[in-house]
Amino acid sequence: MKLPEIGQDAGHRRQSARVADGGARRSELCAPAQGLYPTYRVEHFELLLDVVTDASALATTTHALTEASNLLRQCADPMKTEIMVALADLIGRCDELAPKARSVSALPEFLRLGLTDAAFATLRPDEFRVISADIDLIVALQNRNVEVVNFQHLLFD
């Protein structure tokens, strides 16, 4: 199966990304996360939205959705509600893969990556491309012949 390309010019197609709040791009919602390492800026958030919007299909795991939901709810309303509405919209557009925790914990990657990231090691290499900024996850998936796009490299193209 041929995987769709992630275009280098995705960052220039700003008009295509929309969030569930009626079409407005809410990139200012990422501003509170600027204390994270590495520091992500609004334009990084917008690039990620463009990549996700341009994808022909999206998939994630139940483990990643649970972790994202728990992390995203750690801010106050009204921002929390807006973020959760956007997450619900994203979930509605994704295929949800549900690898069994028992199977994931038996993988050698589990000890180093934990449940959420190791679940991606269950993906079939010919069906999925993963985008990540986590070098440990990237290396583990590349070792399993899963195609991985390093988000850090997209930032500097």
Image: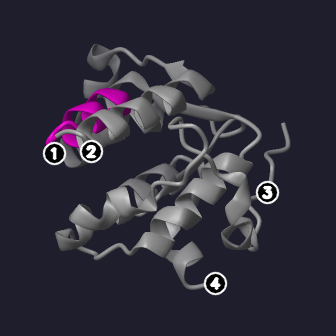
Residue situated in front as seen by the camera: 83 or 110: 83
Residue 103 image point, x, y percent: 34, 18
Residue 157, which numbered label?
4
Question: How dense is the environment of label 2, judged by Cα within 10 Å: few (below 14), some, or many (20 and up)?
Answer: some
The residue labelled by disc 1 is: 75
**Residue that mark 3 sits on:** 5
Disc number placed over residue 79 in the picture, else none: 2
| Residue 24 vertical position relative to residue 32 in the rendered view, above or below | above
**Is-magenta flag for residue 150?**
no
In this rendering, the label closer to the viewer, 3 or 2: 2
Few, some or many residues within 10 Å of mark 4 (<14, 14–19, 20+): few
Q: Give the mark nearest the N terminus, 3 or 2.
A: 3
Describe residue 101's horizontal placement relative to residue 62 as left or right. Answer: left
Looking at the image, can residue 87 be seen? yes
- Looking at the rendering, the stretch of residues picked out in magenta corresponds to 64-76
Front position among marks 1 and 4: 1
Q: Earlier in the sequence, mark 1 or mark 4?
A: 1
Give amino acid for label 1.
Answer: Cys
Identify the element where label 2 is drawn: helix
Distance from disc 2 to disc 4, alpha carbons, whole Å, reads: 31 Å
Residue 72 lies in the magenta-colored region: yes
Q: Earlier in the sequence, mark 3 or mark 4?
A: 3
How far across and how far down the image is residue 79, in percent? 27, 44
What residue type is disc 2 on? Met
Determine which quarter of the picture holds residue 83.
top left
User: Quick one: label 2 or label 4, which is nearer the N terminus?
Assistant: 2
Q: Earlier in the sequence, mark 1 or mark 3?
A: 3
Amino acid bearing label 3 = Glu
Helix, strand or loop under label 1? loop
Regarding mark 4 in the picture, which secondary structure is present there? loop
